[in-house]
Amino acid sequence: METKVIKKIGVLTSGGDSPGMNAAIRAAVRAGFYYNLEMYGIYRGYEGMILNDIKKLDSKNITHVLERGGTFLKSARSEEFRTPEGRKKAYDNLRSHGIDALVVIGGDGSLTGAHLFYKEFGIPAIGLPGTIDNDLSGTDSTIGFDTACNTAIQAIDKIRDTATSHDRLFFVEVMGRDAGFIAINAGIGSAAAAILIPEKKMPIEDLVEKLKIRTKAKKSSNIVIVAEGGKSGGAAEIAEKVKKHLPYYDIKVTILGHLQRGGAPSSFDRLLASKLGVAAIEGLLQGKYDVMAGLINNRVVFTPIKKAIVDDKTVDDDDFRVAKILST
């Protein structure tokens, strides 16, 4: 499809929020102003597009948002957008505002929506990887992942204080859906006794044996990190199984949950979001459509959305090897 003249761009955040989304919105809007474009905020993602909750943005809208977690444009999931009728309604609302293109910030579901929209109605779109899960290919890190890892490590450090004081065994469940990136990074960064991730199934017997060895070595605390989508089950389920083998352990379970999605973005996530926000606007002006902007080896790259959401991105085997060495 030939390059279109773009004068008005809509920005939206969709799906689960992640730290750094506000920084990405700010960067895209400021870049739009730099190139003399009109910028529009689409509130509550695709649902807001259907409800015509679309407002023109000015510099006041993006003042003091860089350091804030969440998304001031808000986010929501939209069942109606999954239907052709819903997408047609959304398209009509965009055209009523004269919006020529979109910047979509979110995870694989959000980018899938942008891809469908482009295929059906020809609305140019660039996706930005806004998810703490780090499960999109085409970028070394997703916006919010670094902050989520920092939050998890800080929480685990606090848990270790009480684990050490009472000789307790803690199972800590972290987010990440079907990917173990947060678990492996938080596990290495917090000196976990073991890390259970979806990509590598660890039999309960192996985990029990590992904990027995640590007991003999008189380790003062044991913390096991469990990714929420692990094949062996959630933290509570695994703790129950281990308790049957190690009844003498005082076992506790902590599920960090949505704690990991909140908070001010780290310096890395602010920088990443800012670079990608500018790249989204420049990419659209250069005729790059139906792609996701990412950062690989500190260079901005554009990956077809379909490839970014379909290609499997898994934990590096070397990271798992390092974690195994350090937990002995």
Image (cartoon, rainbow, N blue to C red):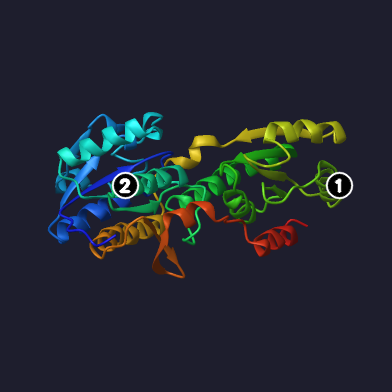
Residue 264 visible within the image: no
Q: Nearer the viewer, residue 268 or 200?
A: 200
Identify which residue is drawn at 33% across, 31% down: 86
- x and y percentages locating residue 173 in the rendered image: 62, 39
- Find the distance from the CA under tag 2 to the CA under tag 1: 45 Å
For residue 276, which quarter of the picture? Answer: bottom left
Q: Which residue is mark 1?
A: 209
Between disc 2 and disc 1, the foreground one is 2
Identify which residue is drawn at 30% across, 43% down: 12
Indicate which disc, 2 or 1, sits on the residue closer to the N terminus.
2
Disc assigned to residue 22: 2
Q: Nearer the viewer, residue 258 or 285?
A: 285
Q: Secondary structure at mark 2?
A: helix
- x and y percentages locating residue 171 in the rendered image: 69, 38
Q: Check the image and name the residue furthest to the left.
A: 36
Q: Relative to residue 278, is residue 130 depicted above or below?
A: above
Q: Relative to residue 324, is residue 18 depicted above or below?
A: above
Amino acid on which the number 2 mark rests in the picture: Asn
Amino acid on which the number 1 mark rests in the picture: Glu
Residue 212 located left or right of residue 176: right
Q: Secondary structure at mark 1?
A: helix
For residue 303, which quarter of the picture? Answer: bottom left
